[in-house]
Image (tube, grey):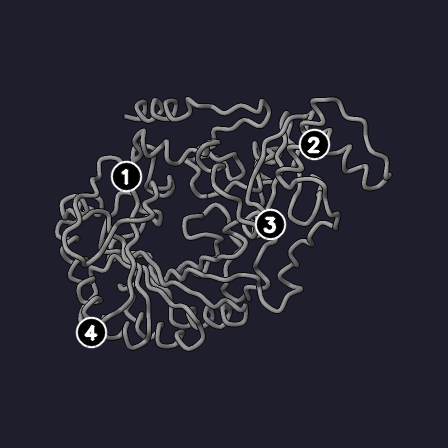
Amino acid sequence: MFYLNEDVFVVSGPVRHAVYNLATGKLYSITDQALDVLKRLKATDDTGQVPELSEGEALTQRFLEMERIYPPALCRKPEGHEAPGDTPDLGMDFAWLEVTDRCNLKCLHCYEEANDGISGRIMAWEDYLHVIAQLKAGGIKKIQFIGGEPMMHPRLRDMITLARPDFEFVEVFTNATLISGEWASFFKEFDIRIAASVYSYDAAEHDKVTGVSGAHALTARGLALLKEKAVPFRTATVCMDGVRMGEKQGDLFSLEGKQDPVRLVGRASLKLLNKDLIARKIVTRTGWFSRPLHKGSVQGAMKRHNCFGTKLYIAADLEVYPCVMERRFSHGNLVGHTLRELLQADILEMTKDRIEGCRDCEYRYACFDCRPDSMGRGRFDKPWYCAYDPTTGLWDDSLADKLLAQKEEMH
């Protein structure tokens, strides 16, 4: 890698290379010849001697100038992220709090692999007090109560009442089946936001996912009570093979907008994806890399993991994980410890530079990494949904068909 200026840098791959222009949001794939021209032009800034360029190299130079890649305004590389121990806070901005892993539904794709409503864990009150104290001390301002089904915790109201003054954003992620008029009034009083999992407008389709007949009706009733009390809520959904979204009826809730294919973690497997959903997940040159670069995201991806570096998930037994869907990595258990003692730099700073099959890829800082969405692969393996091979510089346009064939073999 080398910088041309603060907003333009080059990342070399085995056979091709990428120019990141954060000023314009553009990402370019360039050949060895173009890279050589860039290096020679960059050397000019140090020697003052104008390099001799062939006709083809001169065309490359004009392209670089036209796209505002060159000439550069040289500056030093931006500094890396400070270690958590050297900063006033932990550098984290969000935490999931799993207050219980008990649930009254049996969703076929559950990332949590939640237990039933009788067995399973609930976070003890004394443990909860320790968790809240650590989050406050760490400067974390946004929290979300999750499960299982968080509303199955017998002291959820007390938990929210205690935490609310110290956090600027508090949300409860729920299936909404247990929301009563009393709960809706409580959420309104304490300015709590709600995220509700809904899988279809059609009751039968939704219930097929949850594994409980009548779940859709209970969820709709809960959302109606929230709307009546003017409690802000959003719906969260994932797309799965064999589950129809149905037709919207009324204005109670909307499933439009971002509808991600299910992540293959927990109970979810390739069986829940069809060809269209597989194609939507695959990283292609006309998909992910056709989007404009976001300066903050790229610079962040060079220093910390895009999720692990800013988020925490604290389970009901106080085990601290980097993500609500990730159990293969753990910072340790919070019992008898502080967050500052536990947080591991090798998890926070797990950039693509450490991922097998990605560490040499020229696109690695422009590519989002969902480590939990692994489909059973190793912790440091290349994502299964990436169609690019940096060792050849080629894209596998048949990856969707190969994965579909793999799915058929599972039946």
Q: Mark 3 sits on what residue?
A: 299
Helix, strand or loop at label 4? It is: helix
The earlier-in-sequence mark between 3 and 1 is: 1
Amino acid type shown at disc 4: Glu
Residue 97 percent coordinates (x, y)? 40, 62
The earlier-in-sequence mark between 3 and 2 is: 2
For disc 1, the neighbor class at 10 Å (few under 14, some 14 to 19, many from 20) is many
Which residue is painted at 76% across and 35% down in the image?
41
Tell me whether the residue at label 3 lies in contact with that at label 1, contact meaning CB atoms closer than 8 angstroms.
no
In this rendering, is residue 144 above or below 7? below
Residue 50 percent coordinates (x, y)? 82, 33
Q: Would you say 67 lies left or right of 77 here?
A: left
Corner quadrant of residue 160? bottom left
In this rendering, is residue 67 above or below 14? below
How many angstroms separate mark 4 from mark 1 (CA)? 34 Å
Q: Quadrant of the C terminus?
A: top left
Which residue is painted at 75% across and 47% down in the image?
74
Residue 75 percent coordinates (x, y)? 74, 50
How many angstroms separate mark 3 from mark 1 (CA)? 33 Å
Disc number for residue 182? 4
Q: Mark 1 sits on what residue?
A: 240
The earlier-in-sequence mark between 4 and 2 is: 2
Helix, strand or loop at label 3? It is: helix
Which residue is painted at 28% across and 55% down in the image?
235
For disc 2, the neighbor class at 10 Å (few under 14, some 14 to 19, many from 20) is many
